[in-house]
Image (spheres, rainbow, N blue to C red):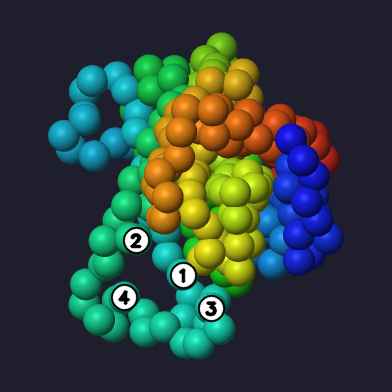
Amino acid sequence: MTETLRADGRTNDELRSIAIERGWSDQAEGSALISYGRTKVLCTASFTNGVPRWMSGKGKGWVTAEYSMLPRSTNSRMDRESVKGKIGGRTHEISRLIGRSLRAVVDMKALGENTLVLDCDVLQADGGTRTAAITGAYVALADALEWGRTKKFISQKAQPLIDSVSAVSVGIIGGVPMLDLAYTEDVRADTDMNVVVTGRGKFVEVQGTAEAAPFDRSELDTLLDLALKGAVTLTEFQTGALASGSGR
């Protein structure tokens, strides 16, 4: 694959600078402030002993997520959806995506009748907010699960986490496949794709759209290979953050 320097100096198969600040919140059972370049998302995990009524007595837990963007996370102020009185379709879609991604790596029976809610709030948006949210939420989730174990809500022998999960965007711009698109790249992409991958390299979700010209099978394979390469690096960042000893 031909290497092309991008506006920020990266090659087409290079992630933006990644940073994960674990334990950012003093109140939440798990938290992480994650940065993909200029995109910054605060992920908090809230642990509740108990499950929604419709799950009670089944011996299984539940993991769900909510996503939002702060009014000045973008160049011009957005109205809060709470003020509008209606949650937008994009917000619902991303919230469900984050929840699905995290549930893919949690053994609900091992979790027991406990609930975890991941809140992912975009502080600053420059493309890839949903992918950053998934990657950061995993770190927050892992810490919240350990909190539940220390409080004896989760059995000491149980292993609720069966894998890690991260996500990254890929796309084709001017015929060139690229990894981890910033906003200025995303808006002019011919093909735009978000890929969710487990630490073992299994796909959880692939969301791809031809914004301009349709893409062929070889281009799809190239994009997935790029995403897998990025996911390996993201997993290393997650592992490093969780080994840092700076959790709640």
Q: SS for tag 4?
A: helix
Quick check: 130 left or right of 35?
A: left
Sooner in the amino-acid sequence: mark 1 or mark 3: 1
Quick check: 107 left or right of 2?
A: left
Tag 1 and tag 2, C-beta contact below 8 Å = yes
Say the numbered circle drawn on residue 81.
4
Quadrant hosting residue 62? top left
Q: CA distance from mark 1 to mark 2?
A: 9 Å
Q: SS for tag 3?
A: loop
Quadrant hosting residue 233? top right
Question: Which residue does the image show at 53% across and 64% down from the upper left?
Answer: 188
Sooner in the amino-acid sequence: mark 4 or mark 2: 4
Can you see residue 23? no
Question: Which residue does the image show at 49% across and 44% down from the upper left?
Answer: 194
Sooner in the amino-acid sequence: mark 4 or mark 3: 3
Say the numbered circle drawn on residue 91.
2
Tag 4 and tag 2, C-beta contact below 8 Å = yes
Quick check: 129 left or right of 36?
A: left
Tag 1 and tag 3, C-beta contact below 8 Å = yes
Sooner in the amino-acid sequence: mark 1 or mark 2: 1
Judging by the rendered image, the residue that carries numbered circle 3 is 74
Front position among marks 4 and 3:
3
Can you see residue 160? yes
Judging by the rendered image, the residue that carries numbered circle 1 is 69
- Determine whether 41 is above or below 53 in the image: below
Sooner in the amino-acid sequence: mark 4 or mark 1: 1
Question: Which residue does the image show at 32% across and 23% down from the upper left?
Answer: 60
- Determine whether 178 is above or below 81 in the image: above
Frontmost residue, 123 versus 153: 123
